[in-house]
Image (cartoon, rainbow, N blue to C red):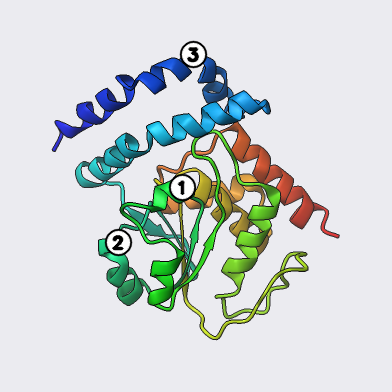
Amino acid sequence: MKQILPLAKKLILNSQRYNRMKEESYSMMVIGVPNVGKSSLINSKMFARVTFYPTLLYNIVMEKITTRNWYDRIDESVILGALPLRRTTKQLIDDENIKAVVSMNEDYELSLVSNAEKEWRRYNIEFLQLSTIDIFQAPSQEKLQNGVNFINKFRNVSDKKLDNPGYDNNHNQYGTVYVHCKAGRTRSATLVACYLITKNNWTPEEAVNYMRTKRPHILLHTAQWSALKQFYAKHVQCPN
């Protein structure tokens, strides 16, 4: 099994597209914030695509040979995890009382090994996709707001929803929401942090520190921290 780790690294480093983009994308990787130019956005998308399967393999290996879990329960309503593999669908529903799924993935990430909306619906699981580019991009404030409102639909509490005229609260079941991206470390962790911020009136630092007690390997960069601070300022620090 340990032999797979160098293989995953080799697949990334030997990729022609990776090497072609490596120098152009280096500044984005360091500061964690993508440049706003069109070419940078294209490079970010290409980099995320070409590294998807090698890094997914890496995540699978790390789950096998380290203490990392594929997913971790954050509280009574939310599980934060990696891409839910199709073979684990029944386990998640039966063992974890999953009633809904929030995916931060792009479409191509769901096409081979995970369920997309159509498959989840077959199990009567509600599904929300908030597509966000891996590595370089933080979810937009609109997506974070929509994601928190969606999670709160499945909590048996009377919390006031965040301002969202298009919000639909029609549902008839409470239970756990599985929030994921590819590794359950960055994109999905950003959304779960926002959920904790509004639920507990926490600062971004308090929310992230709490998540680390449940899922130690979460990883937020400058872009994600900036998104959390904006969200906190709008919805907790200075709510309308």
Judged from the image, the secondary structure of the residue bearing numbered disc 2 is: helix
Q: Is 45 placed above or below 84 here?
A: above
**Residue most extreme to the right:** 240
Identity, as a three-letter code, of the amino acid under mark 3: Glu
Judged from the image, the secondary structure of the residue bearing numbered disc 3 is: helix
Judged from the image, the secondary structure of the residue bearing numbered disc 1 is: helix
**Residue most extreme to the top:** 23
Q: Which residue is mark 3?
A: 23
Q: CA distance from mark 1 to mark 2?
A: 26 Å
Q: Residue at x 21, y 28 (%)?
A: 7
In front: 18, or 4? 18
Q: Quadrant of the N terminus?
A: top left
Q: Quadrant of the C terminus?
A: bottom right
Q: CA distance from mark 2 to mark 3?
A: 36 Å
Q: Earlier in the sequence, mark 1 or mark 2?
A: 2
Identity, as a three-letter code, of the amino acid under mark 1: Arg
The image quadrant that residue 90 belongs to is bottom left
The image quadrant that residue 159 belongs to is bottom right
In this rendering, the label closer to the viewer, 1 or 2: 2
Mark 1, residues whose alpha carbon is within 10 Å: few (<14), some, or many (≥20)?
some
Pointer 2 with pointer 3, Cβ within 8 A: no
Q: Which mark is residue 106?
A: none
- Estimate the x, y position of residue 222 in percent, counting from the top left: 60, 32
Q: CA distance from mark 1 to mark 3?
A: 32 Å
Q: Answer whether residue 200 is visible to the viewer in this image.
A: no
In this rendering, the label closer to the viewer, 1 or 3: 3
Q: Which mark is residue 212?
A: 1
Q: Earlier in the sequence, mark 1 or mark 3?
A: 3
Q: Residue at x 29, y 19 (%)?
A: 14
